[in-house]
Image (spheres, rainbow, N blue to C red):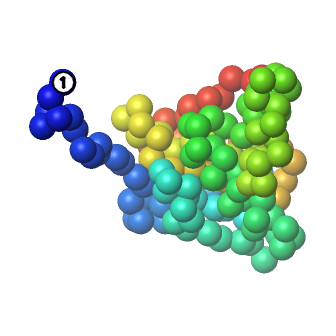
């Protein structure tokens, strides 16, 4: 391919601010329905924080954990509940030492039209409760729920 025909950029998609706000509200409602005090973090497709809410009863450590769950989910488009199984493979086990990688449930990729546009992370309940709240919020707003298989 001649130099002049090589694409120099690629189009990318990322969650819009208003959609992040709606997702945050849906996640807060899902946490309330499950009965957990939690922090909800939403990142854009690049893993940068887009929205955050910590309920009054959530422990302060849940803030960093929720952000890192969202970052982890956005990074490869996989739910964080899958990472525990992934890092057991000796070939990729060193990834477990990445400072922000979280290998417990509660982080989901935000997927729209088959493309990862961000990540949502919830921390405050147990791993299954956090995952269920994240998935419920995604469905409530109309996003796809990707990577729901268990490892």
Q: Which residue is mark 1?
A: 1
Viewer-proximal residue, 126 or 71? 71
Residue drawn at the location 56% of the way across and 31% of the way down: 146
User: SS for tag 1?
Assistant: loop
Residue drawn at the location 27% of the way across and 46% of the way down: 9
In the picture provided, is 116 more to the left or to the right than 131? left
Residue drawn at the location 84% of the way across and 23% of the way down: 90
Residue drawn at the location 42% of the way across and 54% of the way down: 15
Is residue 123 shown above or below 146?
below
Quadrant placement of the N terminus: top left
Asked whether residue 16 is in view, the answer is yes
Asked whether residue 31 is in view, the answer is no
Q: Position of residue 102 (x, y in %)?
A: 77, 47
Is residue 11 shown above or below 54?
above
Viewer-proximal residue, 145 or 97? 97
In the picture provided, is 25 more to the left or to the right than 127? left
Numbered disc total: 1
Q: Position of residue 63 (x, y in %)?
A: 75, 67
- The local crowd at label 1, few if under 14, some if 14 to 19, many if 20 or more residues have their Cα within 10 Å, is few
Quarter of the rendering containing residue 80: top right
Viewer-proximal residue, 63 or 33? 63
Quadrant placement of the C terminus: top right
């Amino acid at each position: 391919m001649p130099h002049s025909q090589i694409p120099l950029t690629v189009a990318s998609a990322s969650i819009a601010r208003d959609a992040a706000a709606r997702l945050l509200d849906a996640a807060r409602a899902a946490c309330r329905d499950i009965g957990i005090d939690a922090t909800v973090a939403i990142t854009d497709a690049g893993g940068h924080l887009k929205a955050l809410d910590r309920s009054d009863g959530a422990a302060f450590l849940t803030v960093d954990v929720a952000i890192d769950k969202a970052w982890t989910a956005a990074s490869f488009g996989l739910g964080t509940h899958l990472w525990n199984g992934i890092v057991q493979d000796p070939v990729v086990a060193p990834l477990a030492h990445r400072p922000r990688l979280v290998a417990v449930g509660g982080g989901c990729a935000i997927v729209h039209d088959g493309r990862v546009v961000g990540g949502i992370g919830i921390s405050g309940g147990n791993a299954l409760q956090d995952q269920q709240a994240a998935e419920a919020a995604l469905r409530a707003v109309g996003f796809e729920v990707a990577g729901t298989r268990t490892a």
